[in-house]
Image (cartoon, grey):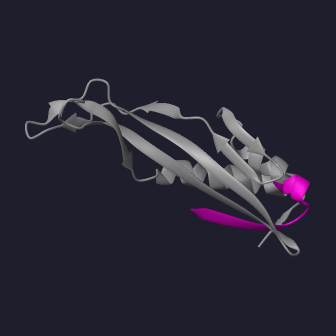
C-alpha cells in the first residue's frame, strides 16, 4: 500500500483520487466512507509458461483492481491506494487453471502514484 498526504479540502482530494483511476471502471464510489474500488482489468501477459516442461500458456493474463481510501486527518488528507493482482495460472486437480494471487505491479503502482500526485496538484493541493 502506498500513501500520499496532502493539504487541501476533502472534496478536492476525493476528485483527484477519482481522476487518478478514470482509465478503469469504478465499481465502488462511497464518498462518505472515502472508498473507491475499480473493477477487474484484464491484462494480456504473452510468453508465460507453466509446468516442469515449461509449456506455453497461450491464454496467459493477469487481472488488476485498485482500491483507494481518502481519509481526513486533522488538517491533512491521506490518500492510500493498493493494487490487488491475480494471474491466470495452472492449478492442477479438477480445476486445471484459475486465478491465483500474485504481487502488485510496480509499474501500475507508480502510474497511479504519478497520476494521483498530478491530479492533487491540479486541484490546488500541496503534497507533504
Q: Is residue 83 left or right of residue 58?
A: right
Position in image of residue 99 (x %, y %): 36, 37
How far across and how far down the image is residue 79, in percent?
A: 72, 61
Q: Looking at the image, how many numbered discs can be counted on the residues?
A: 0
- Taking 124 as reference, is 59 left or right? left
Answer above or below: position of 127 versus 11. below
Residue drawn at the location 48% of the way across and 31% of the way down: 42
What residue is rendered at 68% in x and 42% in y? 21
In this rendering, position of residue 45 left or right of residue 3: left
Residue 105 vertical placement versus 72 (above, below): above
Residues shaded magenta: 1-13
Q: Nearer the viewer, residue 67 or 61?
A: 67
Can residue 53 be found in the magenta stretch? no
State the residue at coordinates (14%, 31%): 55
Q: Quadrant of the N terminus?
A: bottom right
Quadrant that contains the C terminus = bottom right
Give how far across and how far down residue 96 sits, in percent.
22, 30
Q: Position of residue 103 (x, y in %)?
A: 41, 53
Q: Quadrant of residue 95?
A: top left
Amino acid at each position: 500500500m502506498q500513501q500520499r498526504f496532502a493539504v487541501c479540502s476533502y472534496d478536492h482530494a476525493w476528485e483527484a483520487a477519482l481522476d487518478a483511476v478514470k482509465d478503469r471502471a469504478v465499481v465502488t464510489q462511497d464518498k462518505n466512507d472515502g472508498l473507491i474500488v475499480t473493477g477487474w482489468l484484464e491484462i494480456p501477459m504473452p510468453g508465460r509458461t507453466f509446468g516442469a516442461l515449461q509449456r506455453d500458456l497461450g491464454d496467459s493474463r493477469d487481472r488488476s483492481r485498485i482500491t483507494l481510501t481518502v481519509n481526513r486527518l486533522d488538517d491533512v488528507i491521506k490518500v492510500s491506494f493498493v493494487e490487488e493482482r491475480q494471474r491466470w495460472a495452472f492449478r492442477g486437480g479438477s480445476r486445471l487453471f484459475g486465478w491465483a494471487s500474485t504481487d502488485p505491479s510496480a509499474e501500475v503502482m507508480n502510474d497511479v502514484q504519478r497520476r494521483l500526485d498530478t491530479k492533487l496538484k491540479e486541484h490546488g493541493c500541496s503534497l507533504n
